[in-house]
Structure formats: structure tokens, C-alpha cells
Image (tube, rainbow, N blue to C red):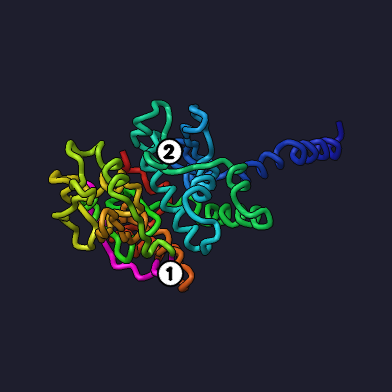
Amino acid sequence: MSKALSMAVFFLTAIIIVFPALIGRGCKMPAGALPNPDQRSSQVDSGAEIKTRVFRSDLGEVITLPLDEYLVGVVAAEMPASFDLEALKAQAVVARTYTVRRLTAFGGQGCERHPGADICSDFAHCQAWEPKEKSLGKWPADKAQGYLRKIRRAVQETSGLIIVSGGQPVDAVFHAHCGGHTENSEDVWSAASPYLRGVRCPYCKDSRWRETKHEFSGAQFAGALLPYISALPVSAAGRPLLDGAQRTATGRVRFLRVGGEQVSGREFRAALEMPSTKFSWRLDGDTVTFTTRGFGHGVGLCQHGADGQARAGKSYREIIHFYYTGVEIVPISGLAAYK
């Protein structure tokens, strides 16, 4: 083989074999640049990646949904879709926090009533949830699709965000209408939470739940209260026997005496199916008329107040910080220390 031919073969070999290898080495990521699969990735911040096991109370079975898809059904069931977008965003973050606190994947205890589920759709126990078909069916036909898109936007634009205190998800309770002032947690339940402090709320004053009236005859009153006390709670003339109300600083009834026996405000409200324990009464013959203010237990987020704040120009973050004292809004991936 001639010298010229040998040189040609040498250079051809370099071009075909050696040069591509060098290029390949130059394109490789440096050591340590590849993500560690054991580390939390940004996918943890996406509600589309986190699975939620939901016990459907209407069907009696557990279904599995991506967290954000589940939250669309929660926001649709828990807050009017006509509310301002920022209020819906606040509700989405609150509902996400409430859920993550219970997810077994993040150290939560799940739903104690339904083994195998993280949460249930019974609003009296966890939080309400409804399938898309039910949501679309309850809204006006000409607004239904727009409402659904609005709620999806609220969930997507807050995806992965939760409320924490001391590095852990808060117990993000909420209610419909506070009646002008939210309540300290220990004045409704037994435990005091540093972030569940009562605040004056003038933002829900335009709601129909600001004040409602409920009238009962002596017989209706007695029939409703008998399961809670041993004696008939009316006089011989049929007049309801009520006195001795003990109230919180904001006016909610803790206890009162009915027919000489003590009944909690929560039991009394449940017996008469009234919207709030923030009530007063007036007797007129054998008829008693209750005037109530607000709807719900009064702790945490006031939904109608959130809407009022949003319409006044407040952001969802400002709304959350107003109702939950001293909290932070962080990505779910910040829960590395949550056990």
C-alpha cells in the first residue's frame, strides 16, 4: 500500500470512528448533573402527579384521582362557581391543603371512617366532592362550561401550593359565612390552633346569610329538642323554655339551658337545623323566632368573605393570609420534613 493511500485510510478511520466519539463525550452531562431519582422532583409540585384515593359516599367505593382533578370536584361542590376567580383560587389552595394533610403518601392518617381512602366525599366528615357531570347539571346550561373552565383555571393556576404553619400543612377548615367575625378554634372545638384566630370580617355583609329568621311552634321546638334532653322543653302553655346562654366573644352560643337542662350550641343548631350558632331568640305566645347570623362553624376561611375580598381587588394570597394567622403558602415539595 502506498504512503498516500495509508494516510487516506488513517484519516478516514479518524473521521468515521474517533471524531464522533469525541463529539459524543463533549455532549455528555458532567458527573452529578443528572437528577437523583431519590430526590423529590418538581413533579411533586404538580397536582397532576399526586394520586388521591377518594371514598365516594354516593357509590360506596374508593376511586383514585390525580390531586388537581379531585380538587376541581371539591371547589365545584364547596364554593359557588359564580364567585370571583381569586376567591376560587383561595378555595383551591385551602382544599388542597386540607387534602394533603390527610394523604398517607405525605404522612397523613387518611380517612379513619373508610380504610384504604385518603379522604371521603361526605362534607359532614371531610369535604364535599362531586363528579363533573353533577356540576354541569346543577349550573345554568348557558354558563356551565364556562364555570367549569373557571374552576379548572383556579386549580391549575395554584397547582402544587398549600398552606403551612411550622413547616406542616395547616388544618385548613372553612365555612360559608362568618356573620361578621370568624371564630377562634378553641371556642368551637377543644383545641387552640395558632393560625385559626378569629378576625373581624366586613367582607361578607352583602350575603343573604348575613341575617336569617327561623320560626318554630312550641310543638315543633319540643319535638326537635327531645332527643337531646330528658324533659319536655316547653311549659304547660306550650311556650319554649330557653335561658342561660353562654356565648363566645363574637356572640356564638356555646351552651344554653333548654327545659332546665344544658345543651351545647352545636347540638341546638343541629336539632333545629339552623345555619349558625350565632343566634338570638324572641318568644311570642307559643312561638319562638330565632335570628341567626352566618352559616357554618365560623372557623378559618369565610367563603362569602373571600368573594367579597376578591371583588374588592384582593388576591388569593391576601385572602388566605387574612383568614389564617401567620401562615406561609409554599409548594408541596417543601414538605420534606412532614412526617
Q: Main secondary structure of the magenta part?
A: loop
Q: Nearer the viewer, residue 243 or 189?
A: 243
Does the magenta-highlighted stretch encompass residue 204?
yes
The reply to whether residue 94 is visible in this rendering is yes
Q: Quadrant of residue 109?
A: top left
| Element assignment for label 1 | loop
**Where does the C terminus fall, quadrant-wise?**
top left
Residue located beneath label 1 in the image: 206
Magenta-colored span: 189-207
Question: Residue 300, relative to residue 267: is it above or below?
Answer: below
- Residue 45 falls left or right of residue 326: right
The residue that appears at 43% across and 36% down in the rendered structure is 120
The residue that appears at 28% across and 58% down in the rendered structure is 278
Amino acid at the residue labelled 1: Asp
Residue 108 place in picture, x, y as percent? 35, 36
Of the residues under marks 2 and 1, which one precedes in the sequence?
2
The answer to the question of whether label 2 and label 1 lie on touching residues, with beta carbons closer than 8 A, is no
Residue 269 place in picture, x, y as percent? 29, 48
Residue located beneath label 2 in the image: 122
Q: Nearer the viewer, residue 140 or 1?
A: 140
The residue that appears at 14% across and 44% down in the rendered structure is 261
